[in-house]
Image: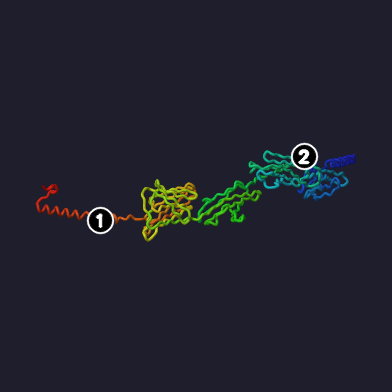
Amino acid sequence: MARVTSALFSLLLTFTTAEEFGIEDIVPDHRVVAQIGHKLALSCRTTDCESPYFSWRTQLDYPLGGKLSTQGKSSVLTIQSVGFQHEHQYVCTAGCKLGEPSKEKAVMVDIYSFPSDPVIELKSPLILGQPASVTCRVPKVYPSEQLMITLIKGKLTSEKEFFQDPHTKSLETKNLKMDFIPTKEDFGKEIICRAELLLEDMALKPRQSTHVMEINYGPRNTQIVAFPGNTILEGEALILTCSTESHPQASFVWKKQLPDGLTQNIMGKYNLSISNPQASDSGTYICEVTNEVTSVVERRSLHISVQASVFSTLTASAASTLTTPSETTVFTTPSETTAFTTPSETTALTTPSETTALTTPSETTSFTSDASSETTTSVTSRATLKTFVSATSEIATPELITMSASDIAPKIITSVTSHAALKNNTVVYLAGVSDDDRNNTEEIIIIARVEELDYAIPVIIVVSCLATVAGPAAAIFIYIFRKMKINGSYSLADSLKPNI
């Protein structure tokens, strides 16, 4: 009886031990999704067995492609870099004792590739108003037939799915293209590309990229500004400035038109400065503007005229006196002349391009010369002048003369100072010219001989007259005095009565 009881106990113990031995699930749901190129570790763990043994295999006996390690109740299959060869079902087999039934657990390894964000590519730089295209590229995708791309530009949206593409065991690059015409409103706005890999039973985070649009344009609305103007005198500094609208920044080239029709490059800056222009610098200057993106080349030209300063000399005869308001014409060494008239105390200077008025007070001064020299009037003017001078005229001496011109409206103020007197009775009149718009100043210099008033002749005449009258007057007084002495009295009334 005891033997039977012992046998039954041993059988029950063996049965109980066999029921408790087992293998835990390798992964939940017996499925794992691994990214190509990444590391994967599959762990097989047993229960209720102190020293189990393990083995691994694929369903179709493909190579494992990994390294096995066993420690205690666990066995681990490690794959360093997942590839297409690892897309199989892996089976782990474990046993507790030899001769006893073994246990198995299987896991399906699915792979995918979605390594990076989409790439936004522009076929060419965006130019305002010109057709353009943008492409969203998603590289190294697997399985590509489960990819969806969305491209967004403002209110424009384009979307594409690739589920109809055939399945291939390879990494694919998928693209989505959009055509549009850039506008001013697009400047600084974003283009968005979003990519999603729709794997079964697994939600991967969408990947997204943005691109800020930079709209290129120009050059346009190019202008040339000349300071102080496009007609200047020799030696008067000239600055030419070229301005334009452009993105990116424009490049400038200054050229000068040559007589043979060709052009000469001068400078590669937006402004051209000529500190001491001469007559040879006159001509047509061209500003050529480009930028590194657009194919637009815009040119603007401006004609510059550099005029020589005029110095005219007026020579009158030795005994001439200039008086107003008569008017006579005297042609000076350039053929241009200057008109001096004062019918209403106003002298007019007429030039080829402007008319200048000098207003003088009523006082006048004679400009004359002695027998040994000539009267010389020198005029330095901003423009070529026409001169009208009367040989017997008289020019008013001003305390202040004001000039105004109809073209650029200069203000000219001239005055005679204590320093104006030179030797030989020569007087220098300095006329300061100022231009409010251009902030330039010039001088008109008038040099003339001044006749000082000769008081000797009137004095001689008065003395002579007095001497002529003094003789008879003295004789009359002497006669009257003697008569009074003889008669004791004298009456002028009685002396004039007739004697009967």
User: Can residue 421 be seen by looking at this rendering?
Assistant: no
In the orientation shown, which residue stands out farthest toward the top? 155
Q: Nearer the viewer, mark 2 or mark 1?
A: 1
Q: Give x and y (percent) for residue 446.
A: 42, 55
Residue 195's label in the rendered image is none
Separation of residues labelled 2 and 1 (CA atoms): 143 Å
User: Can residue 341 be seen by looking at this rendering?
Assistant: yes
Q: Give x and y (percent) for residue 332.
A: 45, 55
Residue type, numbered disc 2: Asp
User: Which of the two residues, 117 or 53, is positioned nearer the viewer here?
Assistant: 117
Q: Give x and y (percent) for residue 175.
A: 74, 44
User: Which of the two residues, 485 or 88, is positioned nearer the viewer here?
Assistant: 485
Instruction: Name the residue: 27% across, 56% down.
Output: 460
Residue type, numbered disc 1: Ser
Side of 43 where 6 appears, left or right: right
Badge 2: residue crowd in 10 Å (few <14, some 14–19, many ≥20): few
In the orientation shown, which residue stands out farthest toward the front? 500
Residue 464's label in the rendered image is 1
Way the structure is coloured: rainbow
Badge 1: residue crowd in 10 Å (few <14, some 14–19, many ≥20): few
Element carrying mark 1: helix
Quadrant housing residue 164: top right
Instruction: Name the residue: 56% across, 54% down.
Output: 283
Whether 490 is drawn above or below 185: the answer is below
Residue identifier under label 2: 201
Q: Give x and y (percent) for residue 161.
A: 76, 40
Element carrying mark 2: loop
In the orientation shown, which residue stands out farthest toward the bottom? 372
